[in-house]
Image: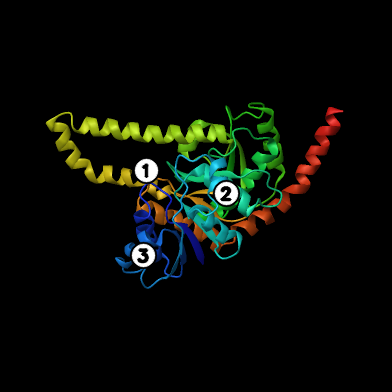
Amino acid sequence: MRLALDAMGGDHAPEMVVRGAELAIERQPDLELVMVGDSARIQPLIDTTTRLKSADLRIIHTDKAVLPSDKPSIALRSGRDSSMRLAINLVADGEADGIVSAGNTGALMAMSKIALKMVPQIDRPAIASFFPTMRGESCMLDLGANVECDAENLVQFALMGEVFARIVAGLERPTVGLLNVGSEEQKGHAEVREAAAVLREIKGHFDFKGFVEGDDITAGTVDVIVTDGFSGNIALKTAEGTSRMMTHFLRHAFKSTLLAKIGYLLCRPGIEHVRQRMDPRRYNGAVFLGVNGIAVKSHGGTDELGFANAIGVAADMARYGFIDRVMEELETVGPIQASLSTNDKAAAS
């Protein structure tokens, strides 16, 4: 299992990348890693570690990196020798099984689409990640790659999402829901209702539960929540903002009086348990589903624990053949989509 790491991507690179790689190797000693970046900065960091010095690891040198402020178009034109692009090229050339980067999201998406191409039968990539819920965790996509989606896009997202949930979360038969403004069949835009009609006809490795609403996200009503990138990104940012707000309220409350400070000491173990459940580092590693290769985006401001988790996501997807399993799933839905499309055209005429 060989993974390419963009060693210069992220707010705290390359230090964070090296420390995250060491933690990943501790968890999965069979990993082979290729770090792409400035060897003059990377090698001294590796020399201070215990496991990386003896691990199967090599460095590909480049002193060029994609900046967080670079627009995707600029990164495509001027970033051909950047650490991000060279790491993606390793996957495209078959020299690595996946790429992990904490760099510029737009640039990573654009470069991945150009270098890796798209999975056959998939029109657009989708960003997928996990949310903490009251029942555990749920996968949600798209989280911002596509502002507008048609019914076919949503069906493709559902198929990729359920395969992703089976591989990364270990779910034997995930439940899938379409995010909507209500649970009734007549609610929502036409493309959402059409996608639901297709998903109801699919007899695959998942259970389609119909429409879910916003409060179902944190309730964990389904394992996979499917939506367009506009709604998904708003839901993601709202959840992140709510988490920060609750943390702010709790911190302020426990500092307000002497009695509150004593209360904090008494309930500290419980608060620590909640903090760990909601720790974004546990869910770090958003995946670009749909590109014909494994590309995982780590949060730019994460630490070594978050980056190691992103490496783990990429390793799981490669180890269990995510791309091949998506293609198998798509073969089951093709005839159904074609049949429904034909029926719709006949009804319209």
Q: Of 155 and 84, which appears nearest the observer?
A: 84
**Between tags 3 and 1, which lies in front?**
3
Query: In the image, what residue occupies the spot 71% across and 37% down?
Result: 197
- State which tag comes first along the sequence, 1 or 2: 2
Instruction: Name the foreground residue: 220 vs 6.
Output: 6
Query: Do the residues bearing badges 3 and 2 touch, measured as CB atoms within 8 Å?
Result: no
Label 2: which secondary element = helix
Q: Nearer the viewer, residue 212 or 276?
A: 276
Residue 29: image x %, image y %? Answer: 42, 69
Question: Which quarter of the rendering shows the C terminus?
Answer: top right
Residue type, mark 3 in image = Gln
Q: Which numbered dot is residue 43?
A: 3
Q: Is residue 208 above or below residue 318?
A: above
The answer to whether residue 103 shows anywhere in this view is yes
Residue pointed to by mark 2:
111
Is 207 positioned to the left or the right of 331 in the image?
left
Residue 159: x percent and y percent? Answer: 64, 47
**Could you say which disc has been placed on residue 278 in the image?**
1
What x and y, as percent, mark residue 110?
58, 45
**Numbered disc total:** 3
Q: Say if residue 290 shows up in the picture.
A: no
- The residue sitting at 72% across, 43% down in the picture is 201
Mark 2 crowdedness (10 Å alpha carbons): few <14, some 14-19, many ≥20: many
Q: Nearer the viewer, residue 216 or 155?
A: 155
Q: How far is mark 1 from mark 2, CA to CA?
A: 31 Å
Q: Amino acid at mark 2?
A: Met
Q: Quick check: 263 left or right of 54?
A: left
Mark 1 element type = helix
Residue drawn where x is 37% and y is 68% of the image: 52
Percent of width and height locating residue 327:
68, 55
Estimate the spatial distance between the alpha carbons at disc 3 and disc 1, rounded to whole Å. Answer: 34 Å
